[in-house]
Each structure stands twice: as structure tokens, then as C-alpha cells.
């Protein structure tokens, strides 16, 4: 049977053997009571990794972002986000449904908002206006193609927000991809943000889980919001054990995914009818544009899946391919052969 090459997302990764052993042997307790020693170790490790006082283990990145927003805001507040942000685009309207806040979007360049535009969007003191309570950043930026926010942009946006008394949250689902690609330590990337969420279950390979990190007081309040959303997982050390392996063993190998993504992107660029903006191929995501009016993103994704390469359409004229630990360099070369064959009909 021909191997299926799954490039839909880095969320399809399966846990390593070491993770499975750690999960089987994990010491557990009731985390809602604060008594799960493995969860406590994971949270301490995560906080140290990103230079924050405390961290909170949550089931998913979406829950992490929504808990973060709820903890920073009050109902009726306004949140500033980049127009293609995951929190705005892919989290089922959680800003409105859960936090009861209004989104104000700003077009960005490869995911980065102009600090001057952020400042212009911050509301003044007026009885007619909602309060601007939060600015959200995303690093790496999913819909921009896995691009890394420039560090000076992060620093400037944080400075603008804080000058106006507005908090900053970073959706760092792929924060460690950003750190490996840029050579900037994760703790430096998020130094000036008030909170950050990052995933264990994408490129780091854990089966479940994300962390929110921030000040000790902020995380104490976030813990209550996690409980409100049903995120108290009790003997969660079984899951946290895999997260500890992810943070201690799986970060540096992200460079392999980035190299494989670049190899794939360069090869796709040589296939007639397809085009990749190589400047956006900075981490493990490759956005492929289709230059054929007779072929849509959905159609190409379907044909590739039938031929053995799973992917997804990310727009009417594009597909997205994602490198991860469970696809090798040889898999990428095989995928290129299949993509070329499909495009030639």
C-alpha cells in the first residue's frame, strides 16, 4: 500500500515512544486541587521557558487564547487583532460568545500590524466607545504562511499598547518555530507581552495541550476562567508528561521541519501552474498559489489527497502544505513527484 503523506497540518503528529512511556509512568493527582505533580512540573517548566512567573496547562490552543482574552477583558470591551489572526478567523466567534468582546481588525504585512495603525485604533475616552482592553499578536502567523513577526515590531506594538494602558496577548501556537527560525529565544520574543499561549500538540509532537503564561496574579485569574470553560482535567499528569518531553526534547528538531518546508517550496515553484512566495517560507508552512483558472484550491487538494498527499485549501486559489516531525525529507521528495504528476493531469 502506498504511504499517505499527510501535509494538512502539524496537528496530525503522533506522540513519540518516549512520550508514550512518560504518559504510562506519570505520577498524577487532582489538578483542579493543584495536586497533580506532573502538571505542576510542566507549568513550572513552561513558565521558565518563556520567562514568565507562572503558566497554566489547558487542553487546546483555542481554549488557551479564549481564556487569555477573558482574563484580560470585561464584557463590552474591544480587542485589536491583525485581520487574518487565528483568534479572529478560526476560533468560532469565541471573542463574542465567551468573552463578550468586540473585535477590531487591522490589515497587516505578513501578519505584522503597523504600530502606528495600532495606536490609531486604540479608543479614546468617550461615552460612545468601547474600552480598548487588549491587543493580540500571532507568532508565527498561520494565514500569512507561518511567517515570523519581526522582533522590533513586537516591541513597538507592546510599547504603544502599554503607553495607553492596554494589555498585549500573543497567540504563540508555534512560538518555538518562531524562536528556532529567528534565532531569538522564546523568552525574549515574549518579554514585553502580558500573556502568551503556545501549543505542545503541533510541531512539538505532544498529543494534547497548550500553555498560557503570564504573571502569577494573571494566571490565578486565568485558572478560574479555565474552570468556567470546562478545562479542569483532573488527573491531567498523563497528558502533561508528554508535554514535558515536548518542551525538553522536541524544540531544536523544529529546524528539520523548516528545512523540509523550504525543500518542498522550492520544488513546488518548479511545477508549472503553481507558485510559492519564498519570502514567506520562514518556518514549516508553505502556501501554494494556483495560477490556473480551471483549478481551485479545493479541487487541487481533493486530487492530491486521492493521489496520496493530504493537504487543505486555504483559499479559492491556494493550498497549504505543512512540514512536521512525521514527514521526512524523502516524503517531501515523493510528495513533489505526486504534485507534479497531478498538475500534469
Image (tube, rainbow, N blue to C red):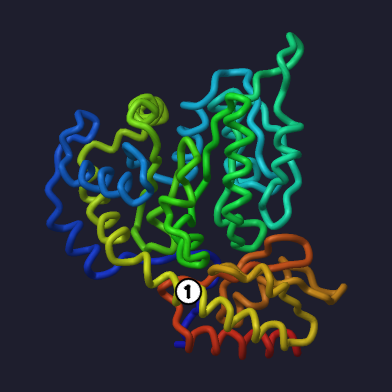
Across and down, in percent, residue 88 comes to 64, 41
Check the picture and name the quadrant holding the N terminus: bottom left
The answer to which image quadrant residue 268 occupies is bottom right
Can residue 11 be seen here? The reply is no
Q: Residue reaching furthest top?
A: 127
Across and down, in percent, residue 219 comes to 36, 31
From the viewer's perspective, tell me whether residue 291 is left or right of residue 80.
right
Across and down, in percent, residue 276 comes to 72, 75
The foreground one among 308 and 127 is 127
From the viewer's perspective, tell me whether residue 78 is left or right of residue 256.
right
Across and down, in percent, residue 5 comes to 50, 78
> Residue shown at 36%/49% (left/top)?
209
Residue 194, above or below 128: below
> Residue shown at 49%/43% (left/top)?
62
> Residue shown at 34%/59% (left/top)?
206
> Residue shown at 22%/54% (left/top)?
241
Residue under numbered circle 1: 257
The answer to which image quadrant residue 166 occupies is top right
Residue 93, above or below 144: above
The foreground one among 39 and 340 is 39
Check the picture and name the quadrant holding the C terminus: bottom right
Residue 64, above or below 201: above
SS for callout 1: helix
Residue 297, above or below 121: below
From the viewer's perspective, tell me whether residue 126 is left or right of residue 139.
right
How many numbered circles does the render carry? 1
Crowding at dot 1, Cα within 10 Å, few <14 / some 14-19 / many 20+, comes out as many
Can residue 95 be seen here? The reply is yes
Amino acid at each position: 500500500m502506498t504511504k499517505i503523506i499527510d501535509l494538512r497540518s502539524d496537528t496530525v503528529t503522533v506522540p513519540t515512544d518516549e512520550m508514550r512511556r512518560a504518559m504510562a509512568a506519570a505520577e498524577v493527582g487532582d489538578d483542579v486541587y493543584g495536586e497533580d505533580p506532573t502538571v505542576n512540573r510542566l507549568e513550572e517548566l513552561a513558565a521558565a521557558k518563556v520567562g514568565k512567573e507562572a503558566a497554566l496547562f489547558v487542553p487546546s490552543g483555542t481554549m488557551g487564547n479564549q481564556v487569555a482574552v477573558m482574563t484580560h477583558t470585561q464584557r463590552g470591551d474591544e480587542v485589536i487583532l491583525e485581520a487574518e489572526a487565528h483568534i479572529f478567523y478560526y476560533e468560532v466567534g469565541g471573542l463574542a460568545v465567551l468573552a463578550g468582546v468586540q473585535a477590531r481588525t487591522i490589515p497587516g504585512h505578513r501578519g505584522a500590524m503597523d504600530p502606528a495603525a495600532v495606536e490609531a485604533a486604540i479608543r479614546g475616552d468617550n461615552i460612545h466607545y468601547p474600552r480598548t482592553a487588549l491587543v493580540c499578536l500571532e507568532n508565527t502567523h498561520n494565514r500569512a504562511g507561518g511567517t515570523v513577526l519581526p522582533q522590533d515590531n513586537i516591541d513597538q506594538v507592546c510599547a504603544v499598547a502599554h503607553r495607553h494602558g492596554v494589555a498585549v496577548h500573543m497567540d504563540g501556537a508555534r512560538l518555538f518555530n518562531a524562536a528556532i527560525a529567528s534565532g531569538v529565544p522564546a523568552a525574549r520574543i515574549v518579554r514585553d507581552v502580558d500573556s502568551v499561549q503556545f501549543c505542545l500538540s503541533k510541531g512539538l509532537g505532544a498529543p494534547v495541550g497548550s500553555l498560557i503564561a503570564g504573571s502569577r496574579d494573571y494566571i490565578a485569574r486565568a485558572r478560574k476562567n479555565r474552570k468556567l470553560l470546562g478545562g479542569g482535567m483532573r488527573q491531567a499528569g498523563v497528558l502533561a508528561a508528554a508535554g514535558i518531553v515536548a518542551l525538553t526534547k522536541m524544540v531544536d528538531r523544529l529546524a528539520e521541519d523548516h528545512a523540509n518546508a523550504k525543500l518542498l517550496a522550492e520544488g513546488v515553484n518548479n511545477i508549472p501552474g503553481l507558485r510559492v512566495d519564498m519570502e514567506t517560507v520562514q518556518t514549516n508552512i508553505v502556501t501554494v498559489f494556483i495560477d490556473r483558472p480551471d483549478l481551485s484550491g479545493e479541487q487541487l487538494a481533493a486530487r492530491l489527497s486521492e493521489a496520496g498527499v493530504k493537504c487543505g485549501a486555504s483559499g479559492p486559489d491556494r493550498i497549504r502544505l505543512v512540514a512536521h516531525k512525521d514527514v521526512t525529507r524523502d516524503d517531501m521528495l515523493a510528495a513533489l513527484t505526486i504534485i507534479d504528476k497531478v498538475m500534469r493531469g
